[in-house]
Amino acid sequence: MPGTTIPPVPHYVPAPPTTEELEWADLPIIDLSKASTPEGREALAPQVRDAMRTYGFMYVVNHGLNQAQNERIFDIADVPFTQVADDEKKKFSYDIKATGLYKGYKLRQYWHIDNGVRDQIEHYNMHRGILQQDHPQALKPFMPEIRAFAEHNHYNILHPILRLLARGMELPEETFVDFHGYDHKGEGWIRFMKYYPRTNEDEEKTRNVWLKGHKDFGTVTILWSQPVAALQIMSPDGKWRWVKHIDNALVINAGEAMEFLSGGFYKGTIHRVRQPPADQQGYPRLGVFYFALADDEVKLAPMLHSPVLQREGVERRWEDDAQAPLMEEWRKGRTSSYGTAQLKKRDDVVEEEVINGIVVKHFN
């Protein structure tokens, strides 16, 4: 992480944690420091397996960064939103639909939420290589720190989790790691993301939903916990429950690509973002993410040589594994379509679209 000489940055002060009584999701907490030894991985693997099978979400603690380093990253994360003029933001926004790529800014009001209401979400996306793309002037002094942060997420958090997921399927430890090369052809990115408060009218039209229920389309998502309560997951019993903030913890979830590779053994869990509780309304919500995707050429077909799948069977979202998309095809299709496609309503809750021949559901 940062060296002894670091550029100054305004300190970001988040909202105080909510004091409201909410129905929290009871997610497992994984101590990642134990993954450094074979004995530790053996003990952790069934915990991670069960978490990703039951919830598709878990907390991770002892991930290698301390609270001060955590706060420094959030300070930097606020720079592209508060230190960059709107005209410069537009110069670093790209045609998401045409390219199928998150790069630079996604500005507000790009996605349709519901009933004519568009999003109030702004994010800045950086390919995991960081230095392979140009950045706004205000962010450039922080590129070495962001690059180190991306590498830490990839090698010290993602890879240990992938090893545990492989163990859970009784596969060689490096099975999923080998699909996630830092310098290989493919995506995977750091995202700084900021939600802004909305009008009462927009809240009413969208039933307080800021981002529809969905599954992430990559393999593993790493969310750095922050105090504004807005993230909800659909629990196994079908109820929406809130994800509680834990200081300097990570919230980890599996995505569709991992669901495909694992033959449905690991679940890409449905989650959404909604208006925060009353005592946090009016505050922005700043997020820091690392989105992991398999290398572009990886075919997202089940690992049929897994002894677990041979015993328990395979769940697919296509008829024949020859139909399984490559990671590149899946990420481009999902990125291009999200928030812009005309969805087909199935009922008052579920809307659908078809991407690469696979039905994708959104939950409103």
Image (cartoon, grey):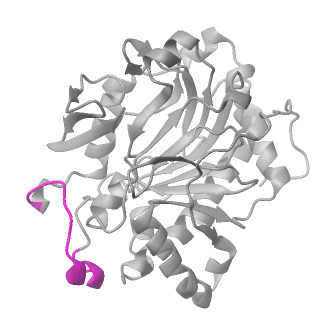
Whether residue 217 appears in this view of the structure is yes
Which picture quadrant has residue 116? top left
Residue furthest front in the image: 21
Q: Is 273 part of what is drawn in magenta? A: no
Determine whether 241 is above or below 66 in the image: above
Magenta-colored segment: predominant secondary structure: loop
**Residue 351 pos. (x, y %):** 26, 32
The total number of labels drawn is 0
**Residue 337 pos. (x, y %):** 30, 29
Horizontally, residue 260 falls left or right of residue 205, namely left
Quadrant of image for the C terminus: top left
**Residue 133 pos. (x, y %):** 55, 34
Residue furthest bottom in the image: 39
Which picture quadrant has residue 49? bottom left
Determine whether 316 is above or below 238 in the image: below
Whether residue 2 appears in this view of the structure is no
**As rendered, which of 336 and 16 lies closer to the eye?**
16
Image point (24%, 26%), residue name: 343
Task: Report the magenta residues as a range.
Answer: 304-320
